[in-house]
Image: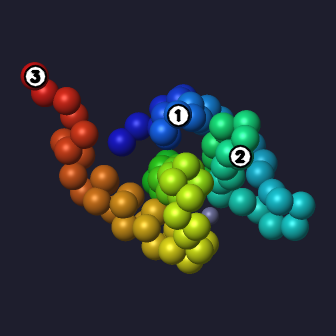
Amino acid sequence: MNIPENIKVGYKDYKVVKVNNLDDGTNLLFGEVTYVDEVIKLANKYPENQMKLTLIHELVHAVDDMLGIDLKEEQVVKLGTGLYQVIKDNPDMFRVTE
Ligand SMILES: [Zn+2]
């Protein structure tokens, strides 16, 4: 998978931004999603694999927000990890062929 600059989630168009430092005031973060601004931030000091996992995690948050599922953080962690695994292990799956 690639890390694109924009990702559509429902009617929202999230901008994906890589940043040097990301924290919530107390803890360092791998990533962060802001629903109102439609921005997903990824801390770029981590390995590529970690950034991709983080992107999928933040996308699960974005889908949760879009559909009002109200997932708990632990569920987002597990779904994100599971989805990333499937995406990584099946690289041809999302390739469009005519
Ligand atoms: Zn989270």
Identify the residue under disc 3. Answer: 98
Pick out the residue farthest to the right.
25
Cβ atoms under marks 2 and 1 closer than 8 Å:
no
**SS state under label 2:** strand
Q: Which amino acid is tagged 1?
A: Tyr
Front residue of 22/76: it is 76
Q: Which residue is mark 2?
A: 34
Query: Ligand 1 sits in which quadrant?
Result: bottom right
Residue that appears at 49% across and 40% down: 9
Callout 1: helix, strand or loop? loop
- Comes first in the chain, label 2 or label 1: 1
Q: Secondary structure at mark 3?
A: loop
Residue 83 visible in the picture? yes
Q: Dot 3: few (<14), some (14–19), or many (≥20) neighbours within 10 Å?
A: few
Location of residue 65 in the rendering, given as x and y in whole percent from the top left corner: 59, 54
Estimate the spatial distance between the alpha carbons at disc 2 and disc 3, rounded to whole Å.
Answer: 36 Å
Lower position in the chain sequence, tag 1 or tag 3: 1
